[in-house]
């Protein structure tokens, strides 16, 4: 009889701890804020060192470069208007770019907690206009590291994870994964 009592107490403790563990894993699953966007993105570029606006943005904290694709060319533009156009070759067409409205690429002006300046890549579309009305509105960059929408007047902080800092309720900028290999001279943006 004593054995059954100890067995039932142990079983009760085991089942209770299992239920608590399962509830702790499931309880916050809807509150997760994803760091990266759920939208598809891909861009591969192997001429970073010979593209001054992109090279400057990747190697200098606080600088940002937009990448757009007008009429089939790759256009790289800094805030001051310095630009560079690249005409893709037939080989480049095998790795076709994919995004909503281009990219904003650069390095935040403040390091992260480990003291590193991690590269960032955002989509160049206003997420508020895109989510509410499916409008692909370009963002305009400012000298303070902000991205501004001319339609809804939302302001996003590029140096702080693309957070919405002015305007109505909305999402932060769509962020993508970015890898830059200086030795191989290759930049890859993807999700």
Image (cartoon, helix red, strand yellow):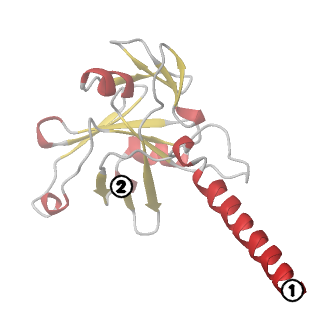
The CA distance from mark 2 to mark 1 is: 64 Å
Q: Which residue is mark 1?
A: 1
Packing grade of label 1 (10 A; few <14, some 14-19, many >=20) is few
Which image quarter: residue 179? bottom left
Residue at x 60% of width, y 34% of height: 160
Work out whether 138 lies above or below 174: above
The label on residue 190 is 2
Residue at x 29% of width, y 49% of height: 40
Which image quarter: residue 85? top left
Taking the image as shown, residue 41 lies to the left or right of residue 95, namely right
Q: Earlier in the sequence, mark 2 or mark 1?
A: 1
The x and y percentages for residue 159 are: 58, 34
Taking the image as shown, residue 7 lies to the left or right of residue 109, namely right
Residue at x 29% of width, y 54% of height: 42
The x and y percentages for residue 176 are: 42, 48
Work out whether 51 lies above or below 44: above
The x and y percentages for residue 164 are: 52, 24
Residue in the foreground of this view, choosing between 55 and 147: 147
Say whether residue 71 is visible: yes
Packing grade of label 2 (10 A; few <14, some 14-19, many >=20) is some
């Amino acid at each position: 009889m004593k054995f059954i009592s100890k067995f039932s107490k142990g079983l009760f403790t085991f089942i209770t701890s299992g239920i608590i563990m399962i509830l702790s894993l499931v309880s916050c699953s809807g509150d997760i804020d994803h760091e990266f966007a759920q939208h598809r993105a891909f861009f591969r570029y192997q001429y970073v060192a010979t593209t001054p606006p992109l090279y400057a943005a990747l190697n200098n904290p606080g600088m940002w470069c937009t990448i757009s694709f007008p009429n089939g060319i790759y256009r790289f533009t800094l805030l001051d208007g310095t630009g560079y156009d690249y005409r893709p070759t037939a080989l480049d067409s095998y790795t076709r770019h994919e995004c909503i409205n281009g990219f904003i690429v650069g390095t935040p002006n403040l390091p992260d907690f480990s003291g590193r300046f991690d590269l960032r890549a955002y989509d160049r579309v206003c997420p508020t206009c895109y989510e509410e009305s499916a409008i692909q509105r370009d963002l305009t960059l400012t000298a303070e590291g902000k991205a501004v929408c001319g339609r809804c007047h939302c302001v996003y902080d590029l140096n702080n994870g693309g957070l919405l800092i002015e305007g109505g309720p909305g999402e932060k900028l769509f962020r993508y994964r970015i890898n830059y290999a200086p030795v191989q001279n290759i930049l890859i943006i993807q999700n």
